[in-house]
Amino acid sequence: MFALLVIIALVTLLVWHYLHMRSVARKFSSQGIARPPLTLPIIGDSLLFLGLSRTEFPIRLKNLFERFGNVYHAWIGPYSILMVADVNYYKVILRDAVSKPYITTYVLKQAVGAGLLVVAGEEWRVRRKMLNPAFHIKLIESFIEVFDEHSRTLTQRLQQHADGKSTFDIYPFISDMAVCTIFETTMGFKPDPNDLDFRKYSSAVHDFIFNESERLVKPWLLPRFAYYMLRYRNFKKSSAATAYMRDFHTKIIRKKRQELEETNNNATQTGDVDDKVSGPKRQNFLEILLTSSIDGKPVSDDVIHDEILTMVMAGSDTSAHTLCYVLYLLSRHPDVQQKAFLEIFSLYAIDSERSITMQDLSKLKYLECVIKETLRVYPIVPFCGRVFDEDKVVGTVCLLTIFFFYCF
Ligand code: HEM
């Protein structure tokens, strides 16, 4: 009897989903929007991505745009998605979308916590307003010495391996530099890349990104139970990495909180609460979180942890991979490398050891073009997702329910 009920429920679900898919497909095809053939209930067009590796996934996405046009409709599992690679739509998408697709936020939430990247709507607005001072250009410019110092450490570490004969993987070195820089600029905590605890933290970040990114391109690994059953080793590694990172952040949060309390106590004792002459010191990301409130309550340790994790994950992997691709492309184009080298040499010919300044950076126009071209050829974040709460007409063509866009 129970088995019969389950079968009836499954068949009803399949028929309902089939009818739903048909009505959505009609809406899009009546506007001339193409879609892949052979869509199946529940799994949608996922078969198009079956068996692809992480590197093949974005290439397949790009091929599908070539096949079906810059705007096409697809089903990723049971989710209806409009794929868009047309700049004319981006303004409306970014302006009017109300949230982010469940399919990406679900994985991101497990990967980077419920920080700025994941939260949407009013929650995002409140957090973003609170954290805006941490993204102020003046604050970022004030970190130029930190960038200089960590870049020097990186080149010294690379020099030990660059014998002109052997090959080696530069990513771990560049990633260390990115994580160290983010730690120091966002939390005021100076990590030593050779310190054992920091080494463990850095490899936890790598393990975590490597294991979790697979789930973004293999939707059947999304449910935690499926991940546990089908990728037990990765699941264990990823969970251990999360626990280590959380523990590491907790220690930093505790230390910083104590430091702030001591500073406040000292300031109260000396009466030096607001220094009007030199102006108040700009707070870093962690200080802002520790001294702010949401709905009249201090920001919880869980929210602080999620925001730190978001900064470390969103900032380190993206900038480290971009830098690797910049170096890779320069190595493949010696003429471009020579021009970039001469531009840098023109600034440092007299004193090659002097520290870099913001004025120097503004003069490195050719290098800036190299970085921008690298981001175009190898976009580290090749797609973003957005959701509308109602159908929307854009131009003369589209009614949009769920929107996913792609900028290759
Ligand atoms: C080449 C380097 C980078 C690229 C290509 C990149 C790309 C992106 C993209 C496309 C988004 C929007 C995602 C969305 O809304 O769905 C984003 C958001 C974000 N990124 Fe980056 N990023 C880079 C570097 C960094 C760095 C260095 C940091 C921090 C140290 C950072 C922190 C963030 C944060 C916190 C958000 C969420 C912002 C918000 O929603 O208010 N990113 N990034």
Image: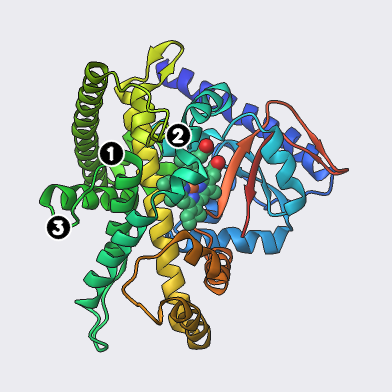
On-image quarter of the N terminus: top left
Visual colour scheme: rainbow
Give the side of residue 278 with respect to residue 198, left or right.
right
Residue, far top: 296
Task: Quickly name the residue at label 3.
Answer: 194
Image coordinates for residue 262, horizontal then vertical, percent: 20, 24
Residue 318 shows up from this direction: yes
Mark with earlier residue (3, 2): 2
**Is label 1 in a helix, a strand or a loop?**
helix
Distance from Cα at disc 3 to Cα at disc 1: 33 Å
Q: Are marks 3 and 1 in contact (CB under 8 Å)?
A: no
Q: Are marks 1 and 2 in contact (CB under 8 Å)?
A: no
Say what amino acid the circle numbered 3 marks.
Asn
**Is label 2 in a helix, a strand or a loop?**
helix
Give the side of residue 165 with respect to residue 214, left or right.
left
Say what amino acid the circle numbered 1 marks.
Tyr
Q: Is mark 2 within 8 Å of ligand 1?
A: no
Q: Is mark 1 within 8 Å of ligand 1?
A: no
Disc number placed over residue 106 in the picture, else none: 2
Which residue occupies the foreground of this view, 247 or 282? Answer: 282
Determine which quarter of the picture holds residue 288.
top left
Q: Residues within 10 Å of mark 2 (few under 14, many from 20)?
A: some
